[in-house]
Image (cartoon, grey):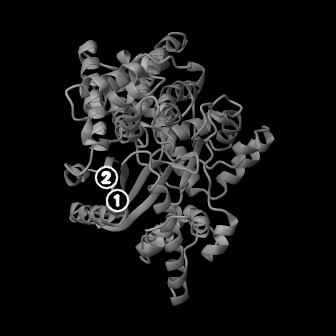
Amino acid sequence: MHSRAPLLSASSTESQHGSDGGPIMHYTSASASNAVFLGHQSGQILPTSENASAAELGLEYYINRAIEHDLKRSLCPVVHFTIDVRATGPNTGYMFIMAHWAADCDGVLHRCRAMMAMCEVEQSNLTEILSHKLREVKDKWLRPLQLEVGYVTTATKGVEMVVAGACLGCIFSPTHYIYLLLKGVMEKVKNEDVHIGQLFQALCKISIHFEQSPGAHDRLLEMQLLCGLPQELLKEKMPTPSNNLFLLMHFLLARQNAFSAYLMENPELNLTCQQWRLLHHLTCLLKPCEDTITTIRREHANLGQVLHELWLLESTIKGCFQQLQEEADAAAAAAVTLFATELLQSLEGHSILAVVRENILYQTATLLHPYFRDHICKYLKGDVHLQRWQLKKQLTQQIEKEYLNFSSAYATSSLTEVASQELESYLQDNIDLALSHMDPLVYWNTRKHMWPFLSTVAFQYFSCPPAPVFLDEVLAIEECIISGRFQESIAVNTMNRDWISEGIRVSNTSTDTGSQPMA
């Protein structure tokens, strides 16, 4: 897990850019030296012996030391959490509780995250265990540093009931619901249109063939070599329709010539010319959905871009109708138009996505995003002017709260006026749109001396991820989960292994006084 993502020197007022003009976003990974210190290769679990237990205690010390060091340097007084549950059976799974915050560490701005708890759960005891684990996390990490629970992002039912009243708010990630929406659209359209139904049957048959025929992948690889496909395509394995239909369609289209040759050798499999056309159009329709999900789940994604991504998704789908008018095959055009129509209507009418769009939290984050600020009206539904006034009122109240948190001396009749002045100054700020790919945390860090309390509010929004981030490191403990040898302390250390080298550095160079590293 990438523990710290450096954004920019905190004292700088200039953004740093890569070759594409975007800010440099380095995400460090576990180094070879960390693997040696762990006593195993990355992706393997330490043996559960006495020596291993002693080693784990050492790792835990350094990991906790590093996490504590960065929590002390949080840009705002809240820490956000993402809560995710990965199923291992119909009623069982593993729960992950991850903390997220932004910190100014030695003059460099970082996005930080750390696994705080991981345990086995059942459907019957999920809320009880979650409540217990959150209390443990708050008592161990937050209260000693006078930090509070910020927003909780999840796609798991039952979480909202547990965290209600104990955090700033519960955020339901739209990515999960876009997946469900796509699944529903596919099921409906394949039953209503014979051409799409036959295409899906053919794709399932092809997928089963490759799962059950050991030599199929080797033969397809030979044909790809003969067709001169690039090396990166040769390494890809065929996805399954149940896993991701878009990826399967994209896989086939990227190697259409090689796959057509393979189909000629296997006459029981078949894709007609019309079905290849359907594949092309359906992939064009599904790609914006896949792009939206990927963008919102990225490590540096933020709440302020969610409404823009949903608006962009709908706009892109609408643009596909023009392309469909140029399709010469009337049956294919009708089939894909039906799919596009159903997809657009589902996006516009989905109840959960409507709640996301109407959520004042997402709306406020969008208004505070320097590059979506001036476009807020196109993301709002209904009375736009009334909603914008309500957003400004909400923000003014949040700014007032930060003034009072800093000092009760600000409790004067003019507090609202002072808070409004900060907000209006931001709303009138001339923003260089050429820097639109800059992380909003960088923008607010350069303005924190101009608008000290509004910037604190902004830090709260932009240090919170809009979706639980998929962790490749979960694969490192998958074997223990499957085999039943799961131990929480070992699993958490493994997930937090990127903190080790920082913990060693902090322990060797720290000048902190009056505090003890958290055990």
Secondary structure under the numbered disc 1 in the rendered image: helix
In the rendered image of this protein, does residue 99 appear above or below residue 489?
above
> Residue at 55% of width from left, 52% of height from top?
4
Q: From where the camera sits, is residue 350 visible?
A: no
The kind of residue on which mark 1 rests is Leu
Q: Secondary structure at mark 2?
A: strand
Residue 405 found in image quarter: top left
Q: Quadrant of residue 482?
A: bottom left
* In front of the other: 207 or 120: 120
Mark sitting on residue 271:
none
Q: Which mark is residue 142?
A: 1
Q: Are marks 1 and 2 in contact (CB under 8 Å)?
A: yes
Residue 358, position in %: x, y? 27, 27
User: Which quarter of the picture shows residue 189?
Assistant: top left
**Distance between the alpha carbons at the discs numbered 1 and 2:** 6 Å
Total numbered circles: 2
Q: Which mark is residue 148?
A: 2
Image coordinates of residue 471 in percent, x first then y, are 49, 55
Identify whether 81 is placed above or below 414. below
In percent of width and height, residue 190 lies at 38, 32
Q: Does any portion of residue 161 appear in the rendered image? A: yes
The residue most toward the bottom is 50
Q: Quadrant of the C terminus?
A: bottom left
Q: Using a 10 Å C-alpha cutoff, classify the residue at mark 1 as few (fewer than 14 neighbours), some (14 to 19) or many (20 or more).
A: many
| Horizontal side of residue 163 vs 28, given as left or right | left
Residue positioned 25% across, 52% down in the render: 159
